[in-house]
Amino acid sequence: MIKQFPPDEQDGEQRSDDESPLHDDGRRERKASPRGPTATPARKKRRWARERAAQGLYQQLMNPIPLEQLESQFMEDAFMLRIDLDLFRRILRGVEKHSVDLDAAIEPHLDRPVDELDPIERAILRLGAFELMHAQEVPRAIVINEAVELAKRFGATDGHRYVNGVLDQLADDLRPGEPARGR
């Protein structure tokens, strides 16, 4: 049991830096964020967009359908209103448009043909390669980190290590002047 002390009192009044009410257990109620209750940081919106894009790319590998139909399937989910839709669409459309070039860029860094990759790892590698090639405004460390996090969440047990190694080598080729994180 945690011992709770009474609040400080001065002249018979409770002293508090904020006027938020107390919970039954003595903790102060948190104030609403100044950004509002529904505000989501842009970084999270981009991460969620990449997650949904990776899922869409995986779905396209498993069961190809027209891109417009795929996008409309995703838009049925109310959560899509919370993500960076422009990034989601840019990745889906860009990877579909440049898939041959992306695979050609990735393949020299693989230990097997692109067609033999696990589909989710292939989708994530394509996503990362697309951002490295066509989103120069995103630092390589962020591109690689986001892809590794996707591989940890959706890929095989050590798939994230494979994704990290391949994208790091690809980044060395595509962005030789950009410093790598930790080097």
Image (tube, rainbow, N blue to C red):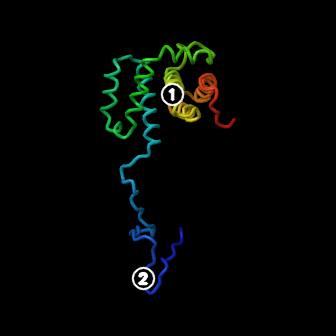
Viewer-nearest residue: 17 or 119:
17
Viewer-nearest residue: 128 or 110:
128
Q: Amino acid at mark 2?
A: Glu
Instruction: Name the residue beneath numbered marker 1.
Output: 131
State which mark lies toward you, 2 or 1: 1
Q: Amino acid at mark 1?
A: Glu
128 over 112 or under it: above or below: below
At 47% from the left and 17% from the top, the residue drawn is 99
Which of the marked residues, 2 or 1, is nearer the chain's N terminus? 2
Q: For this view, does 65 lie left or right of residue 113?
A: left
Q: Secondary structure at mark 2?
A: strand
* Rendered image quadrant of residue 22: bottom left
At 43% from the left and 86% from the top, the residue drawn is 12
Instruction: Name the residue beneath numbered marker 2.
Output: 13
Disc 2 from disc 1: Cα separation: 59 Å
* Rendered image quadrant of residue 26: bottom left
Q: Are marks 2 and 1 in contact (CB under 8 Å)?
A: no
Name the mark on residue 83. Answer: none
**How many numbered discs sit on the rendered protein?**
2
Viewer-nearest residue: 101 or 126:
101
Q: Mark 2 Cα within 10 Å, few/some/many (few <14, many 20+)?
A: few
Q: Secondary structure at mark 1?
A: helix
At 45% from the left and 74% from the top, the residue drawn is 16
Q: For this view, does 11 lie left or right of residue 159?
A: left
Viewer-nearest residue: 70 or 85:
85
At 42% from the left and 82% from the top, the residue drawn is 13
71 over 43 or under it: above or below: above
Quadrant including the C terminus: top right
- For this orientation, the residue located farthest to the front is 177
Q: Position of residue 20 (x, y in %)?
A: 39, 68
Q: Position of residue 33 (x, y in %)?
A: 40, 57
